[in-house]
Image: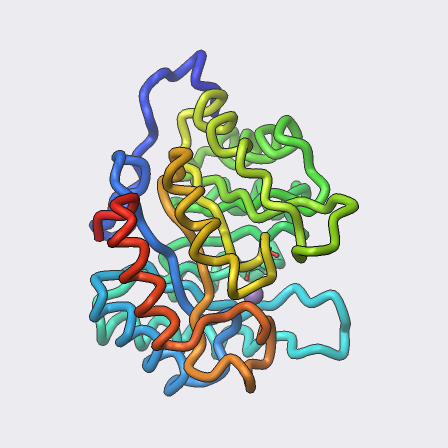
Amino acid sequence: LVSRKKHPENTVVDLKGVMMGDGAQRLVMGPCAVESYEQVLTVAKALKERGIRLLRGGAFKPRTSPYDFQGLGLEGLQILKQVADELDMVVISEIVNPADIEKAVEYLDVIQIGARNMQNFELLKAAGSVQKPVLLKRGLSATISEFIHAAEYVVANGNNNLMLCERGIRTYETATRNTLDISAVPILKQETHLPVLVDVTHSTGRRDLLLPTAKAAFAIGADAVMAEVHPDPAVALSDSAQQMDIPQFNKFIDELLASGLYKG
Ligand code: PEP
Ligand code: MN
């Protein structure tokens, strides 16, 4: 169902009026994790000023260590919804448990399935059974073929509003947190008809690489780039090394616009 051979036309996913996959370049931005209403509001206002309506933020955080901040859960989704309602934004947030989907769809606009759950087939089926757009991230060690099969689970269960996100894979290289597989973008565009995003934050794990990798993503045909923004990354409860603060975010947008690869 996701194969371009069977369905040559691009799928365009409508995110409350923001089109994904229509040939324009989009940005999905926001904090790694929802920490407070003020934190989300501060970031969302900065995004809105630069014309960005796609607001990400983790409420259910899949953390490597059980002792790290696990997210605010449903309260985090409520905060995102409150800010999104005030500023007319679109909420993208990860769900890790199939049982949470029914409740979560009241608050979010896009269900994110994270890298660690790319092959959580029960979660894929559950996300496929609701009519909310889904953003599926590539697994940490998943081949492109496994990624496409995971996507097929969502569509096979009845949900055509699916987007794919390359977020780096595990290799022997240690200079970056993961290795951004940039060629996955044109491969996924050739093999499927789905919108393709690139997450520059989790793939690189390095603030200094966000701009060059975002340019590369747009240059190679990505429909959108995801990156994290936090009012004060030094005190962020997760991913403090790679989130941008607001001045850095504004510079990132200025430089992307100047490159001509992102039109705003
Ligand atoms: C995220 O986007 O918040 C996240 C945890 O990313 P990933 O699943 O790609 O690691
Ligand atoms: Mn993060």
Q: Position of residue 97 (x, y in %)?
A: 62, 58
Q: Is residue 72 above or below residue 94?
A: below
Residue shown at the point (45%, 12%) measured from the top left: 5
Q: Position of residue 70 (x, y in %)?
A: 64, 75
| Residue furthest to the top | 5
Position of 83 with respect to 71 (left or right) is left
Q: Is residue 33 visible?
A: yes
Residue shown at the point (34%, 71%) measured from the top left: 81
Position of 177 with respect to 217 (left or right) is right
Position of 55 with respect to 262 (left or right) is right
Position of 18 with respect to 247 (left or right) is left
Q: Nearer the viewer, residue 123 or 217?
A: 217
Q: Position of residue 69 (x, y in %)?
A: 65, 79
Residue shown at the point (22%, 76%) measured from the top left: 86
Image quadrant in which you'd find residue 64:
bottom right
Number of numbered discs visible in the structure rendering: 0
Q: Is residue 160 visible?
A: no
Residue shown at the point (47%, 28%) measured from the top left: 186
Q: Position of residue 259 (x, y in %)?
A: 29, 49
Q: Nearer the viewer, residue 174 or 47?
A: 174
Q: Nearer the viewer, residue 136 or 128?
A: 136
